[in-house]
C-alpha cells in the first residue's frame, strides 16, 4: 500500500509539474491561465493530502486545462469505463484471461493496432509527446 502511494504521488507530481509549468507558459488568455491555476491547485491539494489521490482526476484536470475547460468529467470517466470494457472483451475473445500481462497486451494492442474497437485508428506518438515522456521520466527518476 505504501509503495502504491509513493508511485501515485510521483505520477501526480509528474502531471503537476508537466501541465502547470510547461503548459501554463502557452496559455494565452487570463481565463485560460485561471483554468491552469485551478488545475495546479487541485493537483497540489492531492499531493499535500488535502484531497484524495485520484490518478484519473489528475489526468482529467490537466487535459481539461489544456482544452480550455471544455471537457466534461463524467463523459471522460464514461469513455474510460467503455474502453476498459472493450479491452476486457478483447482479452476474452483472444483467450488470454489466464495471463497476468493480458491487460498490458490489450492496452498496447488497442493503441498500436487497427482494430474495430479503436475504429481502426491506432494512436500515433508525435515528437512533442516523446519529449514530454522523456521529461516525465527524468522527473520521476529524480523524485
Image (cartoon, rainbow, N blue to C red):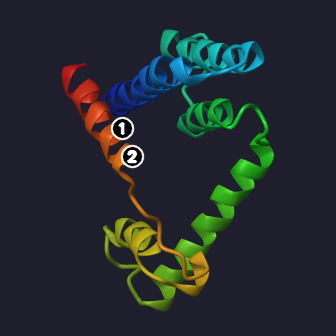
Secondary-structure class at tag 1 = helix
At which x and y percent is residue 92?
49, 85
Left or right placement of residue 29 versus residue 53 in this view = right
Q: Position of residue 6 (x, y in %)?
A: 34, 25
Q: Nearer the viewer, residue 87 or 125?
A: 125
Query: Viewer-proximal residue, 105 or 38?
Result: 38
Q: Which residue is mark 2?
A: 129
**x, y percentage for residue 129?**
39, 46
Q: Quadrant of the C terminus?
A: top left
From the viewer's perspective, is residue 52 above or below residue 1?
above
For label 1, count other residues whose C-alpha is less than 10 Å away and answer few (under 14), some (14-19) or many (20+): some
Binning the other alpha carbons within 10 Å of mark 2 as few (below 14), some (14 to 19) or many (20 upward) gives few
The image shows residue 77 at horizontal and vertical percentages of 70, 50
* Residue visible at 32% across and 47% down in the picture: 130
Give the labeled residue for mark 1.
132
Badges 1 and 2: C-beta atoms under 8 Å apart? yes
Relative to 137, 40 lies left or right:
right
Amino acid at each position: 500500500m505504501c509503495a502504491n502511494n509513493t508511485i501515485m504521488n510521483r505520477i501526480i507530481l509528474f502531471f503537476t509539474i508537466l501541465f502547470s509549468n510547461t503548459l501554463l507558459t502557452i496559455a494565452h488568455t487570463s481565463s485560460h491561465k485561471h483554468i491552469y491555476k485551478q488545475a495546479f491547485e487541485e493537483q497540489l491539494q492531492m499531493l499535500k493530502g488535502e484531497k484524495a489521490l485520484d490518478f484519473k482526476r489528475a489526468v482529467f484536470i490537466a487535459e481539461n486545462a489544456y482544452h480550455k475547460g471544455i471537457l466534461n468529467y463524467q463523459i471522460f470517466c464514461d469513455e474510460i469505463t467503455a474502453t476498459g470494457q472493450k479491452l476486457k472483451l478483447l482479452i476474452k475473445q483472444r483467450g488470454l484471461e489466464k495471463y497476468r500481462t493480458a491487460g498490458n497486451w490489450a492496452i498496447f494492442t488497442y493503441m498500436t493496432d487497427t482494430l474495430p474497437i479503436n475504429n481502426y485508428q491506432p494512436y500515433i506518438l508525435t515528437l512533442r509527446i516523446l519529449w514530454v515522456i522523456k521529461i516525465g521520466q527524468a522527473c520521476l527518476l529524480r523524485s
